[in-house]
Structures are given as structure tokens and as C-alpha cells.
Image (tube, grey):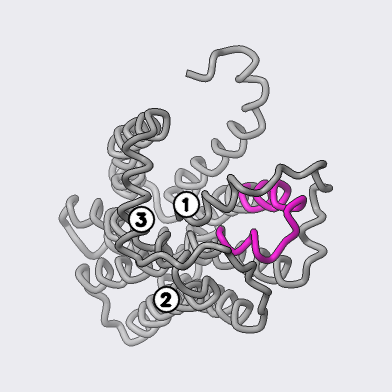
């Protein structure tokens, strides 16, 4: 991660921004970006399915809440290590490894549901495995954008990635609730498996030139140490991390217990749960579109 930051500091700022959809003219970016949106849909469909399935096969509220913990904890634990790995090894190889873990978890979930062997601990274990894959793939994919595209296209690519993710957050949960209601958990897991295999195939098909760095490669331990030291010495980043951590610890409880709200408080089914879950993505899109106007009305703090 520190190598990437140093490279950004050394490079000059682009002279002009590119058109919004210009990054999609790049074959590799277009293919991986498109398949990533499909895989994100699959991830959200799978999240809805395993959360609702846990709420139906387990009487423990704690087990239902642990579904979100099992999928998000790897990103919290491994994000620093994954960033260092993405800078120390081939980012494409790291992406392949990460997507392979996600696809493996989805395929095993589909097979388990097909053979009728689904248990709470199996759901948590496979959710954790998929979370590990996501933690590996996400930093490597974002870092690879700078290698795949010209520097002038990177701002537009970042916007496309953000818009695509928030759009899938608006559609995916509702789609997951519908698939779960009409096709059952097996249909949801099969959809997730094929979507993740599509992303894996896209990464395997595409190659790109990796820009060389004049700096020697850092050891993973050194990169982690330097990154944490840089963060500790930056008051702005440190404050942002503390605020995000406190907000995340409280806000995640809503997502973690949302299946119980849909089932017990609203007497609804998987479609109701999917619609409630989709509200988070819809809210993110509205907030993103309103961000420019909110900054004019209130200070950034």
C-alpha cells in the first residue's frame, strides 16, 4: 500500500479529466468491471440467502447476527495484509486467488443446499471463506486499475466502480429476496456460484501490463509496518479511521439483525428482507447524488 502511495505522490496530476465512460473502451477494464458488477449481485444474493436461511434453521439470534460478522470480519482483519500482498505480488494472481475462494464458497454452498446438508456452522464457515476471498480481491482489483488504464482515465474509473457497486447494492438484495422466495436457497446459491465463476473467468482471460516501480519491492512485514506507522503519524487519517470504526461497530448491528426484524417485527418473508436490505444501497445512491449539494450547505465536519 505504501508503494502505491509513493507512486501517486511522485506522479504529476492529470491535465484533464476523461469522459465518464472512457474507461469502458479498455477491453480488460470493461470485461472485469462488468463481471464484477455481476459478481457483486451474486455476493448480495448469497448474503440475503445465507442470512435468511440462518434465521429459519437456527433459533439463536446470536447465530443470525454472526452471519454478517463472518463475512465482514475477514476484511477487517486482513485488509492491511491484503494491501501489502497486492503491492508485493502479482495483483492479477492475488485477484485470481481471492475470486477463487469466493467461487469455492458459493459452489460448496450450492452443493450443500442441493444435497440438503446445511448447518449453521457450515454457513458461518463458508461465509468466512468468501469474506477472505473478498478481502484479497478488493485491494488488488482497485490497485490494478492504475495498471490497466491511462492516468487520465482513473478518476472516471473510480466513479464507475463506485456507481456500479451502489447500483448493485440497490438491486442485489431485492433480487436475492425474490430468488429466495421463488427458487429457494439452492437457486440463490447457484446464481451466486455462476456469477462468481464469471468473474473468475474474466480475470483469467484478461492480462495487462504492470507498470514497473523504481523502488525495490518491500517485504510484507515491512510494508505493513510502514503503512501503520504512516497512519499513526497522520492525524487526519487516524481520526477518519477512529470515526469509521465507531460508526461501523454501531451501524452493522442494523444489518446483522435485519433478518429478525423482517421475520419477527414485520412478519415478512425473504422478499420483505430483501427490500429492507436494498434500502441501504438506495440510500447510498441518494447520498452520493446529494453529496455535492450537502457540501455547500454544511461544513465537511
Residue 80: mark: 3
**Residue 149 drawn in magenta:** yes
Callout 2: SS: helix
Callout 1: SS: helix
Q: Is residue 267 visible?
A: no
Question: Which residue appears at 43% of the width and 73% of the height?
Answer: 102
Q: Which residues are magenta?
A: 143-162
Measure how far apart labels 1 and 2 are at the Cα level: 19 Å
Measure how far apart labels 2 and 3 are at the Cα level: 25 Å
Callout 3: SS: helix
Residue underneath mark 2: 106
Answer with mark 1 or mark 2, whichever residue precedes in sequence: 2
Answer with mark 3 or mark 1, whichever residue precedes in sequence: 3
Contact, mark 2 vs mark 3 (Cβ under 8 Å): no
**69 left or right, relative to 172:** left
Can you say which quadrant of the picture contains the N terminus?
A: bottom left
Q: Is residue 100 above or below residue 60?
A: below
**How many neighbours does mark 2 have within 10 angstroms: few (below 14), some (14-19), or many (20 or more)?**
many
Contact, mark 3 vs mark 1 (Cβ under 8 Å): no
Answer with mark 2 or mark 3, whichever residue precedes in sequence: 3
**How many neighbours does mark 3 have within 10 angstroms: few (below 14), some (14-19), or many (20 or more)?**
some
**In this rendering, which labeled residue sits more in front, label 3 or label 1?**
3
Instruction: Name the quadrant containing residue 150.
Output: bottom right
Amino acid at each position: 500500500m505504501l508503494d502505491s502511495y509513493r507512486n501517486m505522490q511522485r506522479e504529476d496530476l492529470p491535465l484533464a479529466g476523461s469522459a465518464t465512460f472512457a474507461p469502458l473502451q479498455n477491453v480488460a477494464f470493461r470485461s472485469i468491471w462488468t463481471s464484477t458488477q455481476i459478481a457483486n449481485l451474486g455476493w448480495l444474493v448469497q448474503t440475503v440467502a445465507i442470512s435468511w436461511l440462518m434465521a429459519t434453521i437456527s433459533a439463536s439470534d446470536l447465530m443470525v447476527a454472526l452471519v454478517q460478522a463472518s463475512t465482514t470480519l475477514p476484511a477487517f482483519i486482513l485488509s492491511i495484509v491484503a494491501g501489502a500482498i497486492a503491492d508485493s505480488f502479482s495483483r492479477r494472481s492475488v485477484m485470481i486467488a481471492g475470486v477463487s475462494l469466493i467461487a469455492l464458497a458459493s459452489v460448496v454452498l450450492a452443493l450443500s443446499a442441493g444435497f440438503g446438508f446445511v448447518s449453521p456452522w457450515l454457513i458461518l464457515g463458508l461465509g468466512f471463506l468468501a469474506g477472505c476471498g473478498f478481502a484479497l480481491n478488493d485491494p488488488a482489483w482497485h490497485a490494478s486499475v492504475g495498471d490497466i488504464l491511462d492516468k487520465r482515465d482513473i478518476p472516471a474509473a473510480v466513479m464507475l466502480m463506485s456507481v456500479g457497486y451502489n447500483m448493485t447494492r440497490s438491486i442485489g438484495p431485492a433480487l436475492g429476496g425474490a430468488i429466495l422466495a421463488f427458487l429457494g436457497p439452492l437457486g440463490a446459491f447457484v446464481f451466486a456460484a455462476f456469477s462468481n465463476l464469471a468473474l473468475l473467468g474474466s480475470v483469467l482471460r484478461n492480462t495487462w501490463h504492470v507498470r514497473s516501480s523504481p523502488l525495490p519491492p518491500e517485504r510484507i512485514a515491512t510494508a505493513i509496518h510502514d503503512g501503520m506507522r504512516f497512519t499513526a503519524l497522520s492525524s487526519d487519517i487516524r481520526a477518519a479511521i477512529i470515526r469509521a470504526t465507531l460508526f461501523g461497530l454501531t451501524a452493522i448491528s442494523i444489518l446483522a439483525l435485519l433478518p429478525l426484524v423482517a421475520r419477527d417485527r414485520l412478519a415478512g418473508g425473504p422478499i420483505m428482507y430483501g427490500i429492507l436490505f436494498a434500502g441501504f444501497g438506495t440510500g447510498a445512491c441518494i447520498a452520493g447524488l446529494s453529496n455535492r449539494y450537502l457540501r455547500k450547505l454544511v461544513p465537511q465536519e
